[in-house]
Image (spheres, rainbow, N blue to C red):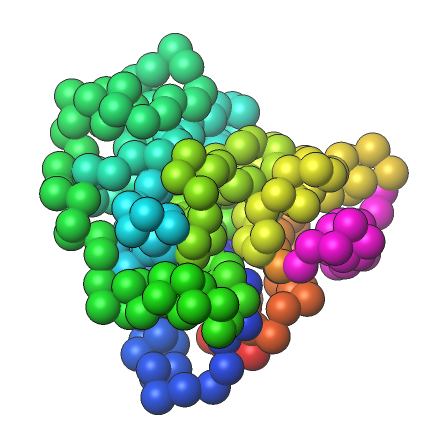
């Protein structure tokens, strides 16, 4: 069994003329990761590549088009975790690396650390072949309009992340996430995406990628909590996922997650109006959806 599931973020999206483009982008990311899995590549490679495709699509809150902080700047976070080895790489607050997920992969592969932040993370990523860009590369008219709506208090803060979980032919799992955070966030704010166990986690049993109001996912260590419910209590995947989102909701938070276990079972619950997602398994099942 091989399987891949990606998400384009939980949030307050309503049906719009952009939906066709968004669905096509999800399909492209899924196809890119799936081609690797079919060729025998690792779950980690599939997650990395699928997220990179989403980082290049301005409709998602990651990479180009990511949410702007209240001062108009972009600070990007990303994380990868290899469930087979517990290797981790994450970056926080990078501004000049085109693919933050590639920077996270560089930390995972080449550093004795697991998380690097700011200019130090950027210098490390550049030293290991990541593509540099000017910070203005990430700013789009769409992200600027979202910030203006926030500043005018005409619309609540938009949420969003992109992420993926994968199971490869060797039975190994991986998870990853990439985000610009919340529109109108204070500069320096860090959400759950790069915090291993909060927004991103994988072990030999399950891979989890969360999306939503990150402060609440951090407070309950959401991704690892789901994994531990399965490993230690024998909870079913879907049961554990809904229990975690119920705990997030009990604190006042909302969002969603994608999770995949070693048997290829998938769950994709969310408590927001939308969560863009796409999935495929080698048994022929799959789909793409926003609402």
Q: Position of residue 72 (x, y in %)?
A: 29, 51
Classify 268 as above or below 185: below
Q: Is residue 250 magenta?
A: yes
Q: Is residue 53 left or right of residue 218?
A: left
Quadrant including the N terminus: bottom right
| Nearer the observer, 193 or 215 | 215
- Name the main secondary structure of what is drawn in magenta: helix
Q: Residue at 43% across / 56% down in the picture?
A: 183
Q: Quadrant of residue 148?
A: bottom left
Q: Position of residue 255 (x, y in %)?
A: 62, 59
Classify 213 as above or below 134: below
Q: Position of residue 84 (x, y in %)?
A: 53, 29
The span shown in magenta is 234-254
Q: Is residue 260 left or right of residue 63?
A: right
Q: Residue at 18% across / 33% down in the picture?
A: 130
Query: In the rendered picture of this protein, how many numbered marks are placed on residues?
Result: 0
Q: Position of residue 156 (x, y in %)?
A: 54, 67
């Amino acid at each position: 069994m091989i399987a891949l599931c990606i998400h384009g973020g939980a949030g307050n999206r309503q049906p719009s003329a952009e939906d066709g483009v968004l669905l096509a982008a999800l399909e492209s990311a899924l196809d890119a990761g799936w081609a690797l899995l079919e060729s025998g590549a690792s779950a980690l490679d599939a997650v990395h590549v699928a997220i990179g495709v989403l980082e290049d699509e301005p409709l998602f809150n990651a990479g180009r088009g990511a949410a702007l902080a209240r001062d108009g700047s972009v600070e990007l976070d990303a994380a990868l975790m290899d469930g087979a080895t517990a290797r981790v790489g994450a970056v926080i607050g990078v501004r000049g690396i085109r693919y933050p997920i590639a920077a996270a992969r560089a930390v995972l592969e080449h550093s004795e650390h697991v998380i690097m932040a700011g200019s130090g993370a950027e210098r490390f990523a550049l030293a290991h072949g990541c593509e540099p860009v000017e910070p203005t590369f990430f700013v789009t008219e769409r992200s600027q309009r979202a910030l203006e709506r926030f500043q005018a208090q005409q619309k609540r803060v938009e949420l969003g992340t992109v992420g993926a979980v994968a199971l490869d032919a060797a039975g190994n799992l991986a998870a990853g996430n990439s985000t610009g955070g919340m529109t109108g966030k204070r500069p320096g704010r860090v959400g759950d995406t790069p915090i291993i166990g909060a927004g991103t986690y994988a072990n030999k049993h399950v891979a989890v990628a969360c999306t939503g109001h990150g402060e609440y996912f951090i407070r309950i260590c959401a991704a690892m909590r789901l994994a531990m419910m399965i490993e230690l209590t024998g909870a079913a995947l879907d049961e554990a996922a809904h229990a975690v989102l119920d705990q997030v909701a009990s604190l006042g938070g909302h969002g969603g997650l994608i999770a995949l276990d070693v048997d290829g079972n998938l769950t994709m619950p969310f408590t927001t109006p939308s969560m863009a997602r796409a999935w495929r398994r080698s048994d022929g099942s799959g789909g793409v959806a926003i609402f």
